[in-house]
Amino acid sequence: MICVGGSVAVSGVLAHAPVFTAEALRYTAACLILLVLARLTGRRLVMPRGTEWLWLTGIAATGLVLFNVALVAGSRHAEPAVLGVAVACVPALLAVIGPLLEGSRPRAVLVAAALVVTCGAALVQGLGRTDGLGVAWAAVVFGCEAAFTLLAIPVLGRLGPWVVSVHTTWIAAVIFAAIGLVHEGPGAAARLDTEDWLAVGYLAVAVTAVAFVMWYSSVGRLGASRAGLLTGVAPVAAAAAGVLLGGPAPRPLVWAGLAVVAAGLALGLRGTKAETKAETKAETKAETKGTGTHRRQATHPLTGFSSTTFQPAPGPCGQLMAAGRPAGQATSTTVASAGGGAPREALKNSSGAHQTS
């Protein structure tokens, strides 16, 4: 998010350049960089299959292409702060919808933290002036920014952040190239000067190749709710980059917004850790009370959702249960978590193996 926030000032360089062609070059370069890095680091890039292509195309079409088109069109009817506030509202949506797609329930502390971060980001950027079309394009920006994360959740479990990043970038490059060819002509790339090429290079490396992998890795490890809080860092980084590039020092209202963003991040990250620990402890106690079982977490290889396996606990209680069970009865059962599809049972015969006559 620091890279994304810092790109605001860099993107201004391309304001008078053939933007669709520049975006096509940006995503092409980013895809090639990701492929080279994957090869050098020995990462195996699995091939998407079936409906996974639809999710990846949806990410590229909305989160990459339509998002940038909305920024360009919206800037003609609204000040940048209006579009920035639209992006700042995304954490609240991720805090509510993200957990549902991940097979869990939204946590009140994360929703509250997301709202605090959104308010802080709005203070940093200000509100700005706009007309009716500007508001409409700001709503499109909001939806596309959320889709960039939400549409990736169903495929991150099997494909991983690298594969998602590689395929969304080349799909976006193809779409932008087609738009640029129609609206800017085949010779548009020749109109890019040195500053434009430097801006494209920075956007390709820092804001796309690096940022995409880091973002999707965060979503996979932290969950959409907690990762969404980090979008509040983007306006903070944008304000800092503006000062470093010779802009004026932040006003008192901006400093207040920075403090509010920091408070929201602290609330969400600290609250999530404590709440998750208490929730896990309560669930384990309720599930194992009086049963002599213990719980083991596993991850479904296709969906990425977790499952819980209950097995006889070691010790006298577990041994007593195993000894008192009739021959042939299962000693472990796996229950799929919400969102993981139909339950799968892992049955283990008490004799250790099936006998055939």
Image (tube, rainbow, N blue to C red):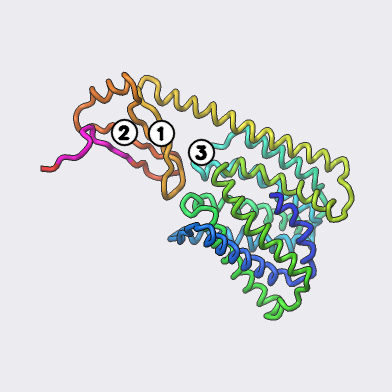
Front position among marks 3 and 2:
2
The correct choice, above or below, for 120 with respect to 186 in the image is above
Residue indicated by mark 1: 296
Give how far across and how far down residue 233 sits, in percent. Answer: 72, 45
Dot 1: few (<14), some (14–19), or many (≥20) neighbours within 10 Å?
A: few
**Amino acid type for the residue under numbered disc 1:** Arg
Q: Quadrant of residue 344?
A: top left
Return the residue found at the far front: 40
Viewer-closest of 142 and 13: 13
Q: Quadrant of the C terminus?
A: top left
Q: Amino acid at mark 2?
A: Ser
Distance Cα–Cα, label 3 vs label 2: 24 Å
Q: Would you name the residue on which mark 2 appears?
A: 332
Residue 39: x and y in percent read 52, 62
Amino acid marked by disc 3: Ser
User: Residue 52: which disc?
Assistant: none
Q: Earlier in the sequence, mark 1 or mark 3?
A: 3
Residue drawn at (74%, 69%) of the image: 197
| Count of residue discs | 3
Give the mark nearest the N terminus, 1 or 2: 1
Q: CA distance from mark 1 to mark 2?
A: 11 Å
| Mark 1 to mark 3 CA distance (whole Å) | 18 Å
- What is the quadrant of residue 113 in the picture? top right
Asked whether, in this view, residue 347 is left or right of residue 257, the answer is left
Residue 319 located within the stretch drawn in magenta:
no
Q: Which residue is mark 3?
A: 104
**Residue occupying the point 85% across, 41% down:** 253
Specify which label sits upstream in the sequence, 3 or 2. Answer: 3
